[in-house]
Amino acid sequence: MDTIASLFSFITTPVSWIIVQFHSLYGAIFGPDTGWAWGLSIVSLVILIRICLIPLFVKQIKSTRNMQALQPKMKAIQERYKNDKQRQSEEMMKLYKETGTNPLSSCLPILAQSPFFFALYHVLSKIASGDTIGVLNQNLVDSAREAHIFGAPIAAKFMDSPEKVEALNASLTDVRIVTAVMIILMSASQFYTQRQLMQKNVDLTVKTPYMQQQKMLMYIFPVIFAVMGINFPVGVLVYWLTTNVWTMGQQMYVINQNPTPGSKAQDHYLQRLLKSVTAHGEVRSRRKRNVVQAIVAKGSDRNDNERRFITGLAKAGLAAQADGTVAKSDTAMAEAEGGSQRRQQPKRQTKAKRQAATQPGATKSPDAAGTVAKTSLQKDRPAEGRSRASSSAADAKPNAGGGKATGSARQPKAGQRKGPQRPKHPSSKK
């Protein structure tokens, strides 16, 4: 770790300068040698870096969503050119270029933050050994060595020997308890951030290997941080715990205010938006109008969440407009009610009920009673008349093909096979 940190020594001077500036501010409030002054200086360093990385975070969100949407196309390219790796790579790059997607954008915040992380690790290692670094002179180094956070020096590690911990005027028990609690919190915050991303902010209609990879990372990353955390100084643990909490809060805001289309978070957001619009009769902010405008522009390409939102507006007598506003519309409400009525299908009767309805003496509906009366009148006619009536009725009935059935064709009964029927024996009663 020290070797890796030394590679980023070029940035230790800016990092140490930022820490000294914040320390001079907090030192005037809490005292220059206190753990609060040095600890809050590290926390402020994290906040400053994460604010500067917000544009990269926005790119990360867009890249992640584009990668989710492109997974089916990428899988098709891999299957089509599975024997030609060069052509497969060319098609992948062409797809990225057409959609404006950069696979590395999802890693930009971590990559941009890594130099500051290792530079801070290098600064704290020098503080632990009592050496000056960057703009930290000997007086500031001695002050940082004396600073304790809940009894643990900011330069102490979980794996330090008792002699090294005693040289920092602390006990090994305090150092290991504080570092263990911080490692657990750091891993738990990382796990929760990834978990809420997978459960709430993923398009559930797109089943791709990308989702499985993210699910694996949800369990792998916390384990990696837990293993690496035992070699981090307390100050670095403060840094990483702060950045994890910032990421978790940032992710919660994105999920609630700008969810992924097709996800559970989008469904919850649109339900909240629907309640607000129906209660006030208007879309009350520009950001929400942009959301409604995007849904209207999709047309028939809307997902289930967006269709439910439009239907909810129609039932309330409102119609979404192309500019993101809503207007009262009785037509939309009538169409929504008519659509719900058309979707209600009548219940299909069982075979036993259909057979019982055709038997004499059974309880008939008005239509069935009329049919029975007509049948009884036909029985009173002579046999020849009944034959002619039956032939005329058969000629008048359209067959399955849309034309008229011939006089010799008979309509099959329930459960009887279609097509020409075998003539009955003369001795048959029916």
Image: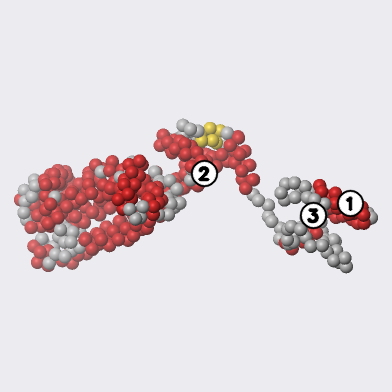
Secondary structure at badge 1 equals helix
* Number of marks in picture: 3
Q: Quadrant of the C terminus?
A: bottom right
For the point 85% across and 61% down, which residue is it? 361
Q: Residues within 10 Å of mark 2 (few under 14, many from 20)?
A: some
Label for residue 409? 3
Which three-letter amino acid code belongs to the residue tagged 1?
A: Arg
Q: Which residue is mark 2?
A: 307
Mark found first going from the N terminus, 3 or 2: 2
Q: Which residue is mark 1?
A: 388
Secondary structure at badge 2 equals helix
**x, y percent for residue 410:** 79, 55
Which three-letter amino acid code belongs to the residue tagged 2?
A: Arg
Q: Quadrant of the N terminus?
A: bottom left
Q: Quadrant of residue 93?
A: top left
For the point 22% across and 44% down, which residue is it? 48
